[in-house]
């Protein structure tokens, strides 16, 4: 049973078309939820950490939010350079400090 | 300095070769990690070092041998690998092996012939 589920698997947007990526989790005792961006053949780039429900973080066109069951990564007016795979990961009480990753959402933004 | 560096960027090796991957960070982090990532899959944890001691080994075959010479360096020694071991190998570090965010290096693309 997946503990971290990301949807959709792939998302195609036109430049300027805002949307949201979802990360739902079923773990108990969440200690942190992390968003990363990964470009092909490169290491994941850290974006945000969220620790508690109601928390929000923003960076340029990205905004991450957290509830007790899921997190959203909102992308406002995306540009082609936002195209990448976005990974969600969690630390929880039973993970021994390890990151448990979702399978990612591949975002493509067309000009 | 918020960078994790990895060398080499690319590595091609035969099944009888011995090679090493290197990782370095100068952020004062006390936890370092090795991950393996296959195409279109998320990173898969291999090893965790906390304060230079191996704390987690996720049932990785013995042909992969990690080493942490000091708090800034992490090596992964490779011997008698199989073609299915071809992947992107990622190093990461964090302040401690708790709930802190992990910072990843660019990875080493390994091809086993």
Image (cartoon, grey):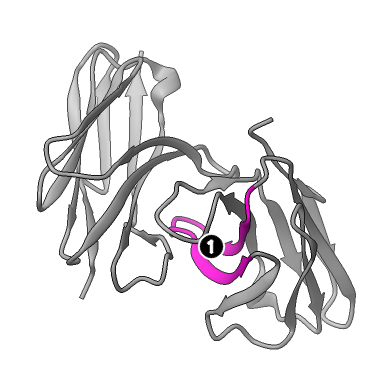
Q: Is residue A9 left or right of residue B62?
A: left
Q: Which residues are magenta?
A: B29-50
Instruction: Report the residue marked by disc 1.
Output: B38
Q: Residue at x 35, y 30 (%)?
A: A108
* Residue B35 spot, x, y in % from top left: 57, 63
Question: Which one is in front, B30 or A71?
Answer: B30
- The tally of labels here is 1
Magenta-colored stretch includes residue B44: yes
> In the figure, is residue B62 to the left or right of A68?
right
The residue that appears at 35% across and 45% down in the rendered structure is A34
Label 1 crowding class (10 Å Cα cut-off): few <14, some 14-19, many 20+?
A: some
Side of B18 where A9 appears, left or right: left
Q: Within the image, what quadrant is residue B83 found in?
A: bottom right
Residue B90: x %, y % from top left: 62, 55
In this view, the residue in front, A16 or B106, is B106
Residue A77 sits in quarter: top left
Image: A69 above or below B67: above
Left or right: where does residue A80 sit relative to residue B9?
left
Give the position of the N terminus of chain B as an image quadrant.
top right
């Amino acid at each position: 049973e997946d503990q971290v589920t990301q949807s959709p698997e792939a998302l195609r947007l036109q430049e300027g078309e805002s949307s949201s990526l979802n990360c739902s989790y079923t773990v108990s005792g969440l200690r942190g939820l992390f968003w990363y961006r990964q470009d092909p053949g490169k290491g994941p780039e850290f974006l945000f950490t969220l620790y508690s429900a109601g928390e929000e973080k923003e960076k340029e066109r990205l905004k991450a939010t957290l509830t007790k069951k899921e997190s959203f990564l909102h992308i406002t007016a995306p540009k082609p350079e936002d195209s990448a795979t976005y990974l969600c990961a969690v630390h929880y009480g039973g993970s021994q400090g390890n990151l448990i990753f979702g399978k990612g959402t591949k975002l493509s933004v067309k000009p | 300095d918020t960078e994790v560096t990895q060398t080499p960027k690319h590595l091609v090796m035969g099944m009888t070769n011995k090679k090493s991957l290197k990782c370095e960070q100068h952020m004062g982090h006390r936890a370092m990690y090795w991950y393996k990532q296959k195409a279109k899959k998320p990173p898969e944890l291999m090893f965790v070092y906390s304060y230079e001691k191996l704390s987690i080994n996720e049932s990785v075959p013995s042909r992969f041998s990690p080493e942490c010479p000091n708090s800034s360096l992490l090596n992964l020694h490779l011997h008698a690998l199989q073609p299915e071991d071809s992947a992107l190998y990622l190093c990461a570090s964090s302040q401690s092996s708790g709930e802190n965010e992990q910072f990843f290096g660019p990875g080493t693309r390994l091809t086993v012939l």
